[in-house]
Image: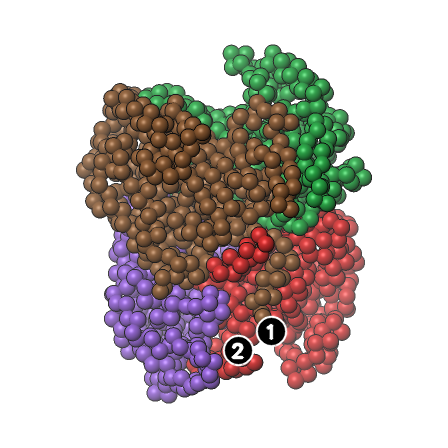
Chain colours: A red, B purple, C brown, D green
């Protein structure tokens, strides 16, 4: 199987199963000279840790990252950066039952169809733990982006029917509540909604939103490697995401041109858009406005609620998935979305360096001097 | 610039500007032995032709495709298939005015920022004519898919506020109306809506939907190359698409697990899903149900309606885009969506051949026999 | 089949068969702003034209290149550059006989084994005409390299037993004789040798040599994408090349360390190598010395001399290949070697721009200013 | 930096420095169902271990491999296989001196030029330990190849002036002497030669040869991805390789067509080559004969012999490289060559599965049954 490599110039390879020895990532193509420590990466990983709130699973996972290569005397050397998080426990016994049937909403059935068998322990490769490698690499990409003046803000936009109110938008609040919502009141309402669903043995969906500021203009390639197309793939590759929007998103299908087009006006001696229906991307390239994107996450598929499925003997059965499962995926996935966005942006910035002959010539002229 | 190559094993390279000498595509990686003629490709191209209805631009473009290589005695040889559509006229004069300012909603500004200048004739590379190469290649991919039992159905799902009614869904009707809607009544209402907007010098958005049947199960790779992630990139790379959904799409953010999960039951001796909220993909792999996806297209950005923008002299101006422009993008884009889906599916089917040792061993055993 | 795409950032796709409608190439990833005309490309193509000397085939082929896209007002725009050379005649009749058997030394047998059949007209895709696309793209790459101060000199180093004498090395002489040798006397001797072999209905091998000057230091990636490794692939991908050397090449196997190592000494305030056994590459990166590489070409396989082979009926037969074939491949291949080297170097220079955080940060800082 | 990823479908990413925490590799794209244990991989790694003979460095390195993912119940699962060899000791102190100057024949200078600084401990990423990841992955590739009937035999062909005598060729002898030569007498003579050079504080070059049997015909892609071109890149990417030959190699430059062409004759009802000057590849595809290739390795650059170089202060100095270094690279590199060949062949076999429509259709027909 392929599929665990991402990127063209800043390329990452992730590996690891939920209940194997560990999970990790190798970054190939990180520029030399970036100050990087395990603490930088750990800070990102801690944002996806379970046990952070009453709505996430109470399992204790330390998920301590170790950098095995590519950093020397506190700086990246230009060689591959290998990072690993060893699994603390390998609890195969907890999962013996699910080996015998297909969990609805999970990849059990498709794994078996593709490969003939599967590592059924805790979801194996399709477990949420797969995202640890993404986030560790995303931490490095995000640190690089800061060197170039690019910042990413990601948060929970909605949980079930509860949406944030932008008039109450408070960036500081995101880390302040366990649901990563920038609106304390919405977070409280969402919490109540989740508790009700948990009592019903059910789970809920939600939406993450991401805003990128500081991108230079003209980043992204035309035709197939449009920046929004690559962001879509990046975000849709996260398990449980079923929809992706940039700017006005699906709503453009009901819009009219005179309202959807963003006019231009001069501002500080440069052309600037008057509105941002485009979500910061025009013709596949960054247009100077903030990049705004959203991802819709389905409800956690593992629920106590009774469900119909079939077992290995080809019998119709009814199951109830036990174990410690989050009733909502979004809050812990916020940092995964941010990581995938960071990885995509850094790659686009790298490729863009070769867009013009004059800039390339100047670059090499300065090296020779 | 990069960005005009798509695919991993079935790789296409498109080229050409709106008002250059022509547009085309080269396919590298098409298997040998497929019966292929220019008529096969032309049939696809004709579906994106302008002038097909009163709602599309009255320009006469013949867009006759010529196959220059890779086919011998009516069959593909395994070598690159080069296809070209020469532009009939090169009307630079029509477009001299737009060289002087940035059209709102277009890529004029971002092209200039990225490359320092642009081929401003008719949008250059970011014109809708860029999709001719995609569709020519998509025709070949779709023909290949038929050899493996895979069928794709694509149509207009909505135009502005007018959605099709699935109780009136009629596949035969799609080619029967100029809006490619599978519901004659909705097509009529949508037509009225478009006419009203045209009177207002405005344009409208819409949504395309695509249904794939016959895919074997287990196709798609896990993690970054999930089938839905690659489909998202493929479709989002089409100009004007701002949102993408698979299965229940954005609505999953408001769903609950017990309703969103698709249960399984035995059917004809095999496990089968009872519902299809997943849209035919679980864990990034095809799950045996029809693959269902949607794309939201923004309204045509070129409108007669007055808009604010800036010119090359750095002055704020007001413009009104003249010329023959469709008031709606979706109908002509339906075949482009279908093409991008076909290209993505054939690539996934190819890569999947290497998923299992036993199947590879059997494959080579048969070759040796 | 795949295989007709080359490069990572400066990517080319070649297409076309010997007796199809034409041959061509699409370049994706050429930076914007390079002055480029058809004359620039034609000058390169003319170097591989047949009919230039009595030792090459007397066929008249004009091979006039046409640029179909990617150039506007005399400069590259950053979009794909499509170039085509239409075949003047499509003489299928000349080649009808060879459809019935496998020519020794040709790819007839392997094509049939891989694809089940082949376009047998003039060798189809494995004809020497396949290199036209490479050379057209190489002309663009070489022009780009000049913008960055990189020059490539390629010539015939030996023909059969006749080697050039470096004490007589005369760069101007290369274009002065039909064998592209930088030594008039060697060219004369080689000419006599070729004539003798032609009388014997036989063909001869030879060696091309290439010297690159002006490369910045540190270009090339470590491990798998070493500059010499990529140059080896590039040059070995030319039909008839059976051996590749960098610097001292195969002879290093008999060398001792104290003689093979290149010492360093300060020169003009910089470290510089005292000798160049390495051929300008250390650890896969350019080391400041000229890059020196060689390729060994086998004798033209199409010969009048009788040879044993088998036909489609499974019978052992004896054949004599008629038609107009060069008795030596090297002279016309010199520009092909140069093209593949140019394509490889420009790609390496592009990728190298992302090697250091500080240089990337400076690059984007200047764009924002 | 990029450069540490190899392969298209069977893709490996290697990582690690000589004196970092460890070295390793991740394989993405290994088919599911291959029986694989750490012992399988360790057997390959042991062939590159130092300390095996008096001619290799007496350092004790256990190099025990651990498989961290991708294997479940003794079989590959189709997910990434992560393998690691932790470094036993991290002896930075041994190497403090070499941080101050450029070792002749090493990548110290080019690393500094490219990245601005380097991990100078033991050569860092350009150490021979970098090959551990290649060999671990090569062990998996070789095991896969056996499932498809492909065998690879690699050995030392020459050391300095001492070549093996094919009339004494004894496959069993390869593992019987510490120089991996298939000729005991040549091994003895080579040993004497090495000892003499060691007394002179010098090192020696040599040549490795590799023979592949059992490849199906028609494997490899035409044009740029010719099987021999990809093998050339694979082998030339190994540090210290300066020349590469396939079949008759460099000697073809002096050959004549009537002798260099391999005729065909019927054998067991199939066409077969009468000779093998081509080295098993015609037109970039396997031709049914054994694939024969050679690589020339330069002498070990680290020698006690005095050499001229410069230090960080820009002073010309004379150095003598102390420490435990092999006087010859080839014997330990034999398994690295074999690994790179195996990785290249498995990738080619995978890609070839998509060469024909009829075979693809049959493949999917059988899956549906």
Residue indicated by mark 2 = A270
Residue D366 seen in the figure: no
Query: Whole-percent x and y of residue D227?
Result: 45, 36
Query: Are discs 1 and 2 both within one chain?
Result: no
Q: Chain of mark 2?
A: A
> In this rendering, would C96 be left or right of C369?
left
Query: Whole-percent x and y of residue C104?
Result: 32, 26
What residue do we see at 52% from left, 27% from top? C250
**C141 or B191: which is nearer to us?**
C141
Of the 4 image quadrants, the one containing the C terminus of chain A is bottom right
**D267 or A346: which is nearer to us?**
A346
> In this rendering, would C107 be left or right of D345?
left
**C221 or D90: which is nearer to us?**
C221
**SS under mark 2:** strand
What residue do we see at 48% from left, 26% from top? D292
On residue C261, the disc is: none
Query: Whole-percent x and y of residue A260?
Result: 47, 80
Query: Whole-percent x and y of residue C200?
Result: 26, 20
> In this rendering, would D314 be left or right of C77?
right
Please identify the residue farthest to the right as the structure is shown.
D93
**SS under mark 1:** helix
Residue indicated by mark 1 = B254
Query: In which quarter of the view is residue A239 placed?
Result: bottom right
The correct choice, above or below, for D145 with respect to B64 in the image is above
What residue do we see at 63% from left, 65% from top? A148
Q: Chain of mark 1?
A: B
Alpha carbon of mark 1 to alpha carbon of mark 2: how far?
41 Å
């Amino acid at each position: 199987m392929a599929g665990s490599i991402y990127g063209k110039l800043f390329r990452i390879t992730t590996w690891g199963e939920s209940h194997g020895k560990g999970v990790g990532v190798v970054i190939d193509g990180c520029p030399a000279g970036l100050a990087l420590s395990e603490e930088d990466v750990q800070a990102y990983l801690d944002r996806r840790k379970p046990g952070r709130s009453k709505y996430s699973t109470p399992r204790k996972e330390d998920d301590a990252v170790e950098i095995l290569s590519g950093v020397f005397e506190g700086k990246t050397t230009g060689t591959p950066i290998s990072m690993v998080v060893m699994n603390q426990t390998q609890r195969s016994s907890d999962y013996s039952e699910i080996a015998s049937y297909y969990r609805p909403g999970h990849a059990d059935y498709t794994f078996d169809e593709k490969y003939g068998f599967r590592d059924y322990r805790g979801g194996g490769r399709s477990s949420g733990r797969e995202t640890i490698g993404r986030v560790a690499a995303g931490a490095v990409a995000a640190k690089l982006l800061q060197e170039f003046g690019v910042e990413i803000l990601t948060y929970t936009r909605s949980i079930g029917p509860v949406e944030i109110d932008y008039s109450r938008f408070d960036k500081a609040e995101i880390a302040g509540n366990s649901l990563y919502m920038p609106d304390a009141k919405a977070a409280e309402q969402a919490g109540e909604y989740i508790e009700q669903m948990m009592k019903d043995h059910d789970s809920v969906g939600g939406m993450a939103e991401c805003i990128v500021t500081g991108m230079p203009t003209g980043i992204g390639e035309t035709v197939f490697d449009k920046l929004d197309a690559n962001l879509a793939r990046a975000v849709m590759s996260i398990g449980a995401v079923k929809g992706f929007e940039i700017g006005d998103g699906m709503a453009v299908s009901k819009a009219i041109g005179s309202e959807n087009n963003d006019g231009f006006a001069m501002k500080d001696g440069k052309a600037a858009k008057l509105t941002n229906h485009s979500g910061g991307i025009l013709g596949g390239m960054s247009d100077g406005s903030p990049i705004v994107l959203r991802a819709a996450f389905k409800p956690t598929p593992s629920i106590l609620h009774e469900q119909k499925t079939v077992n290995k003997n080809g019998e119709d059965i009814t199951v109830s998935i036990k174990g410690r499962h989050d009733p909502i995926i979004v809050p812990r996935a916020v940092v995964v979305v941010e990581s995938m966005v960071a990885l995509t942006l850094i790659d686009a910035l790298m490729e863009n360096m070769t867009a013009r002959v004059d800039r390339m010539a100047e670059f090499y002229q300065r090296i020779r001097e």
